[in-house]
Image (cartoon, helix red, strand yellow):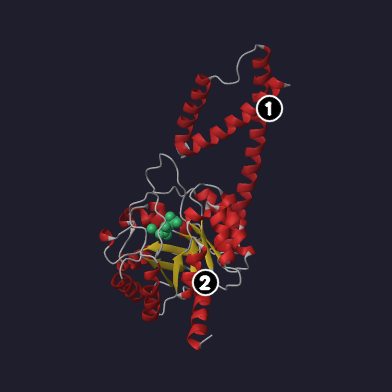
Amino acid sequence: MTSSETTMKETVQAKWNKRPLIISGPCSAETEEQVLETAQRLANTGKVDILRAGIWKPRTRPGSFEGIGTKGLPWMQQAKKLTGLPITVEVATAKQVEDALHFDVDVLWIGARTTVNPFSVQEVADALKGVNVPVLIKNPINPDLELWTGAVERVAKAGIDQIGLIHRGFSAYGNTEYRNAPMWHLAIEMKRRNPTLPFINDPSHICGRRDILLDVMQKAVNLDYDGFIIESHIDPDKAWSDAKQQVTPERLAEMLNEIVWRKEDTPSEEFHLALEKLRQQINHLDDELMQILGQRMKVAELIGEYKKNNEITILQTNRWNEILERAFGKGEKLGLSKEFITKYFDAVHMESINHQNKIMND
Ligand code: PEP
Ligand code: MN
């Protein structure tokens, strides 16, 4: 290795461990000038750690811009030389891994449309054997943590020991606010299962539009994410892909300044004592909730017995609507959202139905 290569490896290690880790750049590399100017303007903000660009673009429908291809890799190499920033691109096939490594790409990422397909992930993993490069893995398009985990396992088995996770939201039918529904609970569960892997948020692909990026970023910071991968373009409206969600490098810097950065912990003893007391209250309330839910199921079972003896169905839709309406009325006064009440009662109702069904079949 030459000494400049050694220095770059060290830079990449330092960036990988830095918090927050900020990765930015255009959705797609379009022209040499666009890549270089974006890189320079991002570097000028002093807030970006790694430069991204899509070289091969997996598009949902044919006919839109499918990426500039291998020809864009020397532009990225040039951008690195110009700014000193390590570079990252998406790879989906063995050939793309080979090409990216040939042009000294420092970090690779596996896209959402690849994570869904174990054949593709395995092909990429096989191409990574014997290579020492950090790999970021986006969540699959569909809300399936096992697929995401499977991709992590395949890449880890190939010998890659620096793996990071990117939360970019999930496809959801009928979802309108976001391009990809964040489904934060799934991300939180993945983070819980993989506490040592860097966990990065991709607000661009979650939002699909500029105006709500900052909200999503703040939420990610509040949930203790390790950083962002966010798209930026020198002239967002003219971008060849994902125009609506990109921001200029200068706007990105402003947004990063507007975020209230929070840390997971503080050494303050006073804070810990106060928190501990409140947590005990929560534990106590949770215990009571469990008791009450258990009692509720017992009553539901008694109702089940009556229904069985009188040969009537478990479900009476009117009664169900009545329960929900009552709960909305009460819940509103207690500051509970309709969304929460619906989810909570759906779960409680399903559990009651299962208990009653068991009684009917006994
Ligand atoms: C991208 O990062 O440009 C991209 C294609 O993202 P995703 O795989 O999340 O759709
Ligand atoms: Mn994109």
For the point 42% across and 53% down, the residue is: 206
Q: Which numbered disc covers residue 298?
A: 1
Towards the viewer: 17 or 27: 27
**289 relative position to 114: left or right:** right
Locate the N terminus and report the quarter of the image it occupies: bottom right
Tags 2 and 1 in contact by the CB under 8 Å rule?
Answer: no
Give the mark nearer the N terminus: 2 vs 1: 2
| Residue located beneath label 2 in the image | 16
- Residue 337 lies, in percent from the top left, at 45, 39
Q: Establish whether ligand 1 lies closer than 8 Å to the Cβ of label 2.
A: no
User: Is 330 drawn above or below residue 216 in the view shown?
Assistant: above
Towards the viewer: 40 or 344: 40
Q: Is residue 236 visible?
A: yes
- Residue 17 lies, in percent from the top left, at 53, 72
Which quarter of the frame holds ligand 1? Answer: bottom left
Q: Secondary structure at mark 1?
A: helix
- The image quadrant that residue 203 belongs to is bottom left
Give me the C-alpha separation between circle 2 and circle 1: 53 Å
User: Is 323 drawn above or below residue 74 in the view shown?
Assistant: above
- The image quadrant that residue 312 belongs to is top right
For the point 48% across and 75% down, the residue is: 102
- Residue 158 lies, in percent from the top left, at 62, 65
Mark 2 is on which residue type?
Trp
Locate the C terminus and report the quarter of the image it occupies: top right
Within 10 Å of disc 2 (Cα), the crowding (few <14, some 14-19, many 20+) is many
